[in-house]
């Protein structure tokens, strides 16, 4: 496993990580979660991602049970949670000081932990001043309930605003952002956040590196009967795959298959390794519903070197979607 610094911090995070979104839900129980997390841990993964919204909090309960069962040293793990969607009450969602405080405490109770290493603002909150959120996150760190804080799917301007508020008030600024990033979702990582990597030392832990499975080639010949997008709560994902934009992506994935075959790697490995090639990516969050999938995903770390400059250029020719940098907002 390769370990990268998370942004400008001294924290070393595994380049491949394991997340609870989707799989710690209808498809999972504690036993399967144990097998998957152990497979990831044995491969060198130290970062396990979660959120209060995943399975209505049950994903945190399962992860906490697994960590307790394994007996792993807490210092060997980087555990995250994300705060925004905590329930149906009027103050159970958003980034108010109240919900951040109560949401974090509830998450820690479910995880059976004294602290999380990373805590994210799961989405921007247009109803709460960013100042309030920055102060609340700083308070959690001062209380020892979290070690670092960051954002997920925030705009660059919002991250920068939070950063300068923290600096002006002598508080701890956001360290990391968790955006979607893959061959078909590139704008934020490769364009919008570009000025932030040097300016604020932003780290990134990216999700959906395989575009919900599209990049693996599993939908090249239609939707398999056992696919998770046939589950009752995933009609939205099925609609995306079957949309015109989804079909265009599948056609590009089909064109990438001969290149993957030539390299002797799977399309999943190619998709994950492509994300790992970006040095502004601190960790690639993977998901899997069984230990064999985890093992397959972890093999991607060994094929990054096969994606030479020439190979990356061939991939780029197929994708034809590289973002064009603009003058950044500091100018």
Image (cartoon, rainbow, N blue to C red):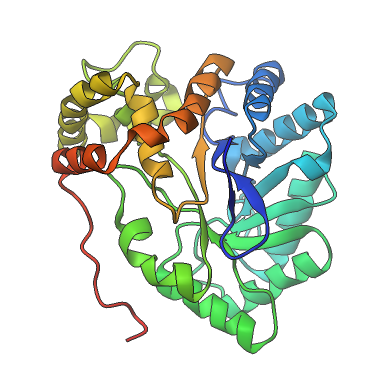
The answer to whether residue 65 is visible is yes
Q: Position of residue 131 (x, y in %)?
A: 60, 80
Q: Nearer the viewer, residue 2 or 59?
A: 2
Q: Position of residue 35 (x, y in %)?
A: 67, 18
Q: Quadrant of the N terminus?
A: top right
Q: Nearer the viewer, residue 53 or 43?
A: 43
Q: Position of residue 190 (x, y in %)?
A: 33, 58
- The count of marks equals 0
The answer to whether residue 289 is visible is no
Figure check: 35 above or below 130: above
Figure check: 125 above or below 185: below
- Give me the residue at 22% from left, 23% from top: 257
Q: Position of residue 280 (x, y in %)?
A: 44, 56
Report the residue that reaches farthest toward the top.
Answer: 225
Q: Quadrant of the C terminus?
A: bottom left
**Image-based side of 245 in relation to 241, left or right:** left
Q: Quadrant of residue 328?
A: bottom left
- Give me the residue at 31% from left, 63% from top: 191
**Image-based side of 3 in relation to 77, left or right:** left
Q: Quadrant of residue 193?
A: bottom left
Q: Nearer the viewer, residue 227 or 6?
A: 6
**Image-based side of 137 in relation to 53, left or right:** right
- Give me the residue at 26% from left, 77% from top: 327
Q: Quadrant of residue 54?
A: top right
């Amino acid at each position: 496993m390769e370990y990268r610094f998370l942004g400008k911090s001294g924290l070393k995070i595994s380049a491949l990580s394991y997340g609870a979104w989707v799989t710690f839900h209808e498809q999972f129980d504690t036993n399967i979660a144990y097998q998957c997390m152990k497979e990831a841990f044995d491969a060198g993964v130290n970062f396990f991602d979660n959120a209060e919204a995943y399975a209505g909090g049950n994903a945190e309960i399962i992860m906490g049970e697994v960590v307790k069962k394994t007996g792993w040293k807490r210092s060997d793990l980087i555990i995250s949670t994300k705060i925004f969607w905590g329930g149906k009450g009027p103050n159970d969602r958003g980034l108010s000081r109240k919900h951040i405080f109560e949401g974090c405490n509830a998450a820690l109770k479910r995880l059976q932990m004294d602290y999380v290493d990373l805590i994210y603002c799961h989405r921007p909150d247009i109803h709460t001043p960013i100042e309030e959120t920055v102060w609340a996150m700083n308070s959690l760190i001062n209380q020892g309930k979290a070690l670092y804080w960051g954002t997920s799917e925030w705009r660059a301007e919002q991250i920068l605003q939070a950063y300068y508020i923290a600096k002006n008030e002598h508080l701890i600024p956001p360290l990391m952002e968790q955006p979607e990033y893959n061959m078909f979702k590139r704008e934020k990582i490769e364009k919008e956040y570009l000025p932030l990597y040097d300016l604020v030392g932003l780290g990134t832990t990216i999700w959906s590196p395989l575009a919900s499975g599209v990049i693996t080639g599993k939908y090249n010949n239609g939707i398999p009967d056992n696919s998770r997008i046939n589950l009752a709560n995933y009609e939205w994902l099925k609609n995306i795959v079957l949309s015109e934009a989804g079909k265009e992506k599948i056609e590009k994935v089909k064109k990438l298959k001969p290149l993957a075959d030539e390299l002797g790697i799977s399309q999943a490995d190619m998709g994950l390794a492509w994300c790992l090639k970006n040095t502004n990516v601190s960790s690639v969050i993977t998901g899997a519903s069984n230990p064999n999938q985890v093992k397959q995903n972890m093999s991607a770390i060994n094929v990054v070197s096969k994606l030479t400059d020439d190979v990356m250029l061939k991939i780029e020719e197929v994708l034809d979607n590289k973002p064009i940098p603009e003058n950044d907002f500091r100018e």
